[in-house]
Amino acid sequence: GTHLAREVYPGDGRLAVAGPDTREQAKQALRKLGAGGGTAIGTWLRRADRLLASADVAIRHGILLTDGRNEHESAEDLKAALDACAGRFTCDARGVGTDWEVKEVTGIASALLGTADIVADPAGLAADFTRMMETAMGKEVADVSLRLWTPAGATVAFVKQVAPTVEELTGRRTEAGPRAGDYPLGSWGDESRDYHLCVRVPPAAVGREMLAARVSLVIPHPDKGVQNLGAQGLVRAVWTDDLAASTSINPQVAHYTGQAELADVIQEGLDLRKVGDRDGATAKLGRAVQLARASGNADTAKLLAKVVDVVDAATGTVRLKAKVEEADEMTLETRSTKTVRVKK
């Protein structure tokens, strides 16, 4: 991929089946390539979509690697390409080195329901690529959706994934029959994910109880339209005048609300740091250190410690480091949405 997308192997709009011969032929074809040219990622994605669509398979997965910014097409062109490819294949995105734009790479992964990360040292690319391939090959079902049914009078305020990463899903809803909507989750293997939803219900008298929502996982089915994967959760609303019961926050909800805030304040803090607002950046990143400590998110705490000097983690008292390696700042920004689960 440069300002154009060119098929290296096998060519002519075809795909190859992996085997000893095809692997060797692919290596020979790659050895003839030279580095250079522009970056137009939307063009690459559209070419990948055409290639993947030529195969009669359930799971279509791409891996996007870039060491540059998307400088040879407009942001609108990339957005149009992402809209065209969404739901057609999933895509993991990686930025190699430090000359790429974090928001571009994470935005691509988010739109195409994949993962995003940084490979700051190209020497680590082979190992990271191997892990991505192993995960991709472990996918068993494609086009999974979270189906949310709500009764008459109830409205959905938000739906978001909160583990293993924070991902906003509210705006991705497609209607799925009376009072039901589907939220796309991509391909699944042997894994678990956590979701946080908020439903508003009409007022009722103390002591009343109602089913506020029904949550299930579904996949497309050629005959029935969709097939339920057998997982279902019921959300109850109960009216009470018990002050303790009505004001206490469920520990899981509190944990993931904190994790979502952690992702937000890291992003806000880094953005303020880039524009020279040191006081604002210090306040936001200090709050991030406090949240990371409270939730036990040790990985994020370590990344924050490369950007700020921690004076008191419990109170969020920090100082911005005078000099920060670009790779460390980009790693923190790229991995800011990664969460930890509630401690048992």
Image: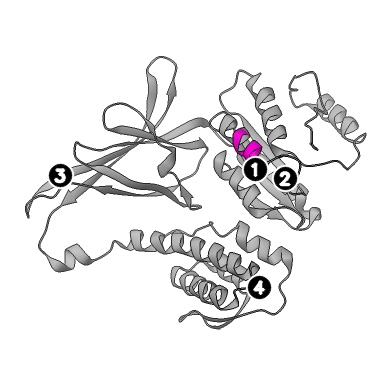
Tell me the residue that label 2 is attached to. Answer: 70
Depth check, mark 4 against mark 1: the one in front is: 1
* Residue type indicated by callout 2: Asn
Main SS type for the magenta part?
A: helix
Pointers 1 and 2 in contact (C-beta within 8 Å)? yes
Quarter location, residue 219? top left
First in sequence: mark 4 or mark 1?
1
> What span is colored magenta in the figure?
75-80
* Cα distance in 3D space between marks 4 and 2: 27 Å
Q: Residue tagged by mark 1? A: 75
Residue type for callout 1: Ala
Calculate the distance from the C-alpha at mark 3 to the C-alpha at mark 1. 46 Å
Quarter of the rendering containing residue 343: bottom left
Residue carrying label 3 = 210
69 relative to 145 in the view: left or right: right
Q: Residue at x 61, y 43 (%)?
A: 108
Of circles 3 and 1, the one toward us is 1
Query: Cα distance, mark 2 to mark 3?
Result: 50 Å
71 up-or-down from 149: above or below? below
Secondary structure of residue under mark 3: strand
Left-right relation of 344 to 178: right
